[in-house]
Amino acid sequence: MAKDYYEILGVSKGASQDEIKKAFRQKAHEHHPDKAGGNEAKFKEANEAYQVLGNAEKRRQYDQYGATFDQQGGFGGGMNWEDFMRQARGSGGGFDFGGDLGDIFGDLFGFGGGARRGRSGRGRDIEIDITAPFRDAVFGGEKEIELYKNIKCEACHGSGSEPGSKIVNCASCKGSGQVRRVQHTVFGAFQSVATCPDCGGEGKKPEKLCGKCSGGGFVKASKRIRINIPSGISDAQVLKMSGEGEAGERGAAAGDLYIKVRVKPDSKFERDGDDILTTEHISFSQAALGDKIEVETLDGPVRLKIPDGTQTGKIFKLSDKGVPHLNHRGRGDHLVEIVVKTPAKLSRRAKQLLEELREEESRI
């Protein structure tokens, strides 16, 4: 019975070449014979399928002829699995897979493409939450916090070297920052290049390690940090302070500090974007006859004119009395919603006046 290469790789017949390549990578990792639970037969089968489906021309022929398709031993050009195994073992490594297989087997065995030289040693980022008063979020303010974190070693200034000692070439990699390793696999012995574990790929290391930080370039300590809260910041917005995260290794860059600002609500003002919303209650007579009322704003009290005939729900705008725009000029507005109070109890005189008003309205 003809093998279903699509089923072997777990892809549909309409799969793209990238999807087929990705599926083969997954199968190769899963069934690699050197891994615990690996399966050489399935590894071979997956490779055989990829040799056909990974080649556009062979795939076209396979789709057209199916069982009568001759895929020439799995690797093309007449080389079958046994040929491949024999050459890999006989060569002692260094077999040139070529093309996509070179990339894929390089991922599996750690060769091909070279090693990444060096490591940044950059410090970790820190994320914290702080609480800011409503008015600090509106007009800006400061907050001081204390963090217990990795800070640069003061004794060696982050170099990791004992003061007065020299920086020398790493003995393990002879200053190259790389070491060569030999891996023994089912295919034979393969040589790979990796980052030197002793110097982290830098090629140099202290002749004598700093006694305070043991060569790391940082120590754990508390540090007080002053945070500037910008005017106009909203609840849950995040501030970034570059270089205020964890210190890096041996003078590498420090991480960043990310601060999520939680704004306390205010009992008087409600914020909607950069606008401020408040509610003012006026009497029935003020609504009917008009008046001037005092409204509390972020900048202090202002006088607001209430025209006669004002209804409940009417909104008045106090321009430029809202929240300053973050990182921009100008401010939002202060919107005042009017609520007309209906008296629960009326005097005899008040009732009489309202009766007269009702009669007057009926004649209008």
Image: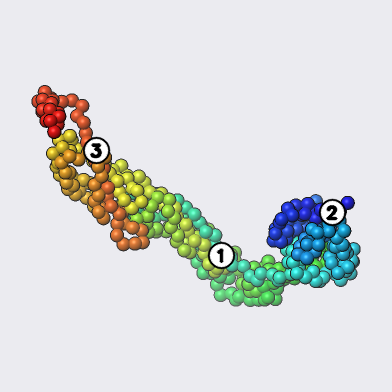
Vertical placement of residue 275 versus 209, above or below: above
The residue indicated by pointer 2 is 3
For the residues marked 1 and 2, what is the alpha-carbon distance in whole angstroms? 50 Å
Q: Amino acid at mark 3?
A: Thr
In this view, the residue farthest toward the front is 363
In this view, the residue farthest toward the top is 348
Disc 1 element = loop
Rendering coords of residue 95 (x, y %)? 82, 70
Vertical placement of residue 175 versus 76, above or below: below
- Residue visible at 24% across and 51% down in the picture: 318
Rendering coords of residue 234 (x, y %)? 38, 52
The reply to whether residue 199 is in sight is: no
Looking at the image, tell me whether mark 3 or mark 1 is earlier in sequence order: 1
Q: Amino acid at mark 2?
A: Lys
Tell me if mark 1 has few (under 14), some (14-19) or many (20+) residues whose alpha carbon lies within 10 angstroms of its own.
Answer: some
Disc 2 element = loop
Q: Which mark is residue 122?
A: 1
Residue 307 or residue 272, whichever sits in front: 307
Q: Which mark is residue 198?
A: none
Rendering coords of residue 50 (x, y %)? 78, 60
The residue indicated by pointer 3 is 312
Tell me if mark 3 has few (under 14), some (14-19) or many (20+) residues whose alpha carbon lies within 10 angstroms of its own.
Answer: some
Q: Is residue 43 left or right of residue 171?
A: right
Closer mark to the observer between disc 3 and disc 1? 3
Residue 230 or residue 145, whichever sits in front: 230
Residue 93 or residue 361, whichever sits in front: 361
Q: Amino acid at mark 1?
A: Arg
